[in-house]
C-alpha cells in the first residue's frame, strides 16, 4: 500500500503517540506528509534507526472477556506514534506480499491473511463435510485452540525463518 492510501485508511480517532502527531493532521496534510514520511521511512529502513519517539508507547490494558478481576482477561494495547503505525503497515504489506510470492502460507491457513478469515475456513470445512457425508466417507475432526498463541511465538526463530526466505534484511 502507498503511504497516502494508508493515511486515508487511518481512523480519525487514532491516538497520537509521544510525538503528538495525530491522524487528523496527517489526513489534512496527506500529500505533503506522505512525501516526507516516505523519506523518513526510507532513511529508517536503510540505516536501521528509528526515531526515539517512535520507540515509546503508552501501554493501556483493554478488557477482553471473563472475570474483570483477572489480569489474564486483559490484553495490552500500546498507544504509539501514528507515523510509526503507518510505517509498520507499509512494512507489513511488503512482508505479506513477499510471503505470498514465495507461497509461504499453507493453503488451509485462513486466519490473519487478506481475503481469508476463520469464516472462509469454516465454510470450506462444511463444504468438505457435506461432500464426505453424501459420499459415505468418514470424517474425523480435531479442533485446537491456540490460546495466547501470539505470546508464545519464539521471535528469534521467526526472524531466522524470514531471513532464510531471503526477506530484505532491512525489513527484519
Image (cartoon, rainbow, N blue to C red):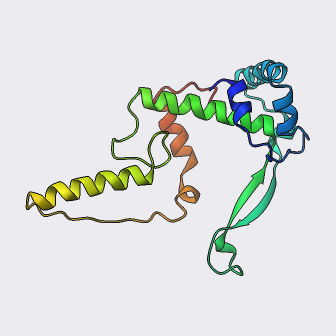
Residue 33 in picture, x, y percent from top left: 83, 23
Left or right: residue 117 compared with residue 4: left
Left or right: residue 140 compared with residue 93: left
Number of on-image labels: 0
Left or right: residue 157 compared with residue 132: right
Residue 154 in picture, x, y percent from top left: 54, 51
Q: Is residue 172 visible?
A: no
Q: Residue at x 72, y 25 (%)?
A: 4
Which quadrant of the figure has residue 28?
top right
72 and 110: which one is in front? 110
Which quadrant of the figure has residue 102?
top left
97 and 48: which one is in front? 97
User: Is 111 situated above or below 90?
Assistant: below
Residue 78 in picture, x, y percent from top left: 76, 53
Residue 169 in picture, x, y percent from top left: 59, 26
Q: Quadrant of the N terminus?
A: top right
Q: Residue at x 58, y 31 (%)?
A: 93
Left or right: residue 6 compared with residue 56: left
Amino acid at each position: 500500500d502507498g503511504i497516502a492510501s494508508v493515511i486515508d485508511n487511518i481512523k480519525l480517532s487514532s491516538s497520537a503517540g509521544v510525538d503528538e502527531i495525530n491522524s487528523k493532521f496527517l489526513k489534512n496534510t496527506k500529500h505533503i506528509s506522505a512525501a516526507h514520511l516516505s523519506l523518513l521511512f526510507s532513511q529508517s529502513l536503510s540505516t536501521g534507526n528509528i526515531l526515539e519517539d517512535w520507540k515509546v508507547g503508552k501501554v493501556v490494558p483493554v478488557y477482553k472477556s471473563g472475570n474483570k478481576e483477572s489480569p489474564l482477561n486483559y490484553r495490552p494495547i500500546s498507544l504509539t506514534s501514528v507515523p510509526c503505525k503507518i510505517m509498520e503497515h507499509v512494512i507489513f504489506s511488503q512482508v505479506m506480499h513477499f510471503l505470498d510470492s514465495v507461497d509461504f502460507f499453507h493453503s488451509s491457513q485462513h486466519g490473519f491473511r487478506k481475503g481469508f478469515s476463520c469464516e472462509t475456513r469454516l465454510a470450506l470445512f462444511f463444504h468438505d463435510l457435506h461432500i464426505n457425508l453424501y459420499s459415505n466417507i468418514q470424517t474425523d475432526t480435531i479442533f485446537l485452540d491456540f490460546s495466547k498463541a501470539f505470546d508464545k511465538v519464539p521471535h528469534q526463530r521467526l526472524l531466522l525463518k524470514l531471513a532464510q526466505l531471503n526477506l530484505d534484511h532491512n525489513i527484519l
